[in-house]
Image (cartoon, rainbow, N blue to C red):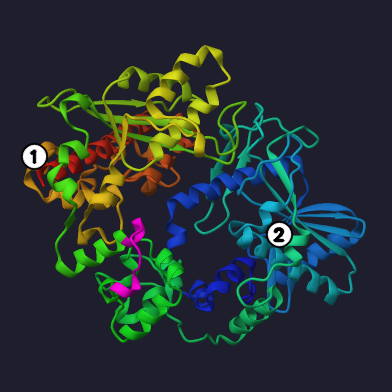
Amino acid sequence: MSKASLSKSLFKVGLECPLRVKYSLARPVLPRRSGGDEYMRMLAEGGYMFEKLVRIYHPGDDMYIPRETHEAAFARTLERITKGDCTLHEATFAFNGLMARSDMVRVRGSIVDIIEIKSASVEADLKGNTDNSCLKKAEWEPYVVDLAYQVHVASQAFKAAGVKKTIRAWFYVPNKAGVANSEELRGLFSITQPEKGKRPDVTYKGKAKAGDMTSLIAILDASEAVASAHPEEKSVEEAAESLSLDIANDAWPKAELSLKCKDCDFNVPGQTSGYDQCWGSQARAEHHLFTLGQLGHLEKANPGLVQRIIGAAAPRAPLVTDLQDIDIMGQGSRAVAWNRQILAVRTGKPYVSKDLAQNTEALLRCQAQHYPLFFLDYEGTRCALPSAPGCRPYGQVAFQWSCHIIDKPGDPIRHAEWLDTDSEDPTTGFLQSLMELLGDTGTIYHWGNYEVAVTQELVNEIRHDRSKAALAAWADRNWGHGKGKEAVRSKRTLDLCNISREHFYDPAMKGSHSIKVVLPVAWKRKEVQQLFPEYSKDRNGKPALNPYDALPALTLLDREPSGLSQLADLEELDIVKDGTGAMRAYEHVRYGTGSSLPAVREDVRRQLLRYCQLDTAAMVMVWRYWLGN
């Protein structure tokens, strides 16, 4: 085993806080939020598939050997590079406590190209060529710094070995303007996790090969951006030297409590991790300053404010109520929201606007002329590789909707739903089923802008098809269309999340307006519970504090053990309780081992339907709660 070295992943986490390197190296392993972030894991899996596609078109020697020392891995890499022209995947560079493993290295004469394959996307022409202006944007800085670190380690390693090479830097990323051919589809790739914490294995069963044309790969020349990379207050070289010394000496600086701690990988709610070691007894105060909604924007408007409050509050935790009137200036929407949260925490009482309290029916558009009422929720997914020929990277795949409906005042609530786990591209069926359900009258409730944005994106994908002109026209009338100054908004849709943001706040919401946070507040009222008594008990038969606790587990335990053994990560599909869980379940029955197991497919479909149905029931419950205020 190699002794601890500063890898590129450790370099990235250490730039914001050296203690994150310490906690990354800790044994036993500390709980880490990024490792459990299912949405980020899904994006990473798409990235692995895209990297596999790049390797197909740019084949080379795979240099990775599990558990090999960094020094031995670099010796093999150096030997191969000095032999002559080659393309290497997972090549290792190592020098004096620094280590970097590069996605792809291409050697042509005296030129060594270090290529980072990322799932971040850009728009390029059909040959993959584009300008490099995006590399100057803030969101690209972490990627540029990552590549700059690789170049630094490689150059130092070459210098120490007496090898004279000119190093260039590149990004290969998905081209959002490209379209997939029949050999580049998501369904041709499968991922298995051979060992927890290790890199997944990606299998490709298509026929694409080196030399074939593709429009899915955009190529960015990053040499200039890398040369000027300057993270934080130090250069790449200075930061690398400082962090490698911390590792070598096992000597770490004192914790600097700051706003950065809020989003630390080791800040894991419900578990003790590095964040708790830094903050001690201050870590989990009920109304910690970090629970203030959009705290980063407040710090941006008043630089140094968060640090001042943290320092003044010590040794106790900084609290939302430590903010004073002078700290929050102006009458903008954010300032209003901050003041409401502070007031609610101080008084222990929810904030309800005058409009929500006195003009509820008009505000919520539930007067007779606004019926029928449709409470609508979508489930969808995206992937770096398209699901059907002619589709683009990260194109929206909408596979499910749920809708609770009240046809006219006093009518009972009814439910409708749609789910397609079989089609490569369910877009037309999705939109057609919605048109049949919603027609052209009534109010369409949604929570957040997702449903509106997805509908408009899907419609834009079918506009070129004259046979679908009526479907596109219906969507334009009922969901709005266009962007910016040319945007035409729908008169039928009403975002209940905006109602919450502008008219309601309860101290229990802790700065969030997610429906999963607002719902438990509404659920406390008996009249709300009586609407949906099926959610009154959690999985253990106890009174549910949150209806999402009532979602039953998949009934896979009733199946044959041989069927269970074919599920790679059964516990991840045990309960579909959030949007990412729905995405993973869909991916499992479309492309995973569940796709070939009818019993498992049926179980997962049933779970998807239950989850999405609760999302729209949740909207009805919150709506009814507001009507009762």
Circle number at residue 14? none
How far is the residue under mark 2 from the one under mark 1?
Answer: 58 Å
**In this view of the protein, which residue sits in the foreground, 248 or 46?**
46
Q: Which residue is mark 1?
A: 530
Q: Which residue is mark 2?
A: 102
The range drawn in magenta is 325-335
Give the image location of residue 292, x and y in percent: 32, 65
Q: Secondary structure at mark 2?
A: strand
Residue 329: within the magenta? yes
Q: Residue at x 49, y 29 (%)?
A: 458
Give the image location of residue 76, x and y in percent: 79, 64
Identity, as a three-letter code, of the amino acid under mark 2: Ser
565 left or right of 238 in image: left
Image: 387 above or below 624: above
Residue 341 seen in the current view: yes
Residue 483 seen in the current view: no
Give the image location of residue 167, x and y in percent: 83, 62
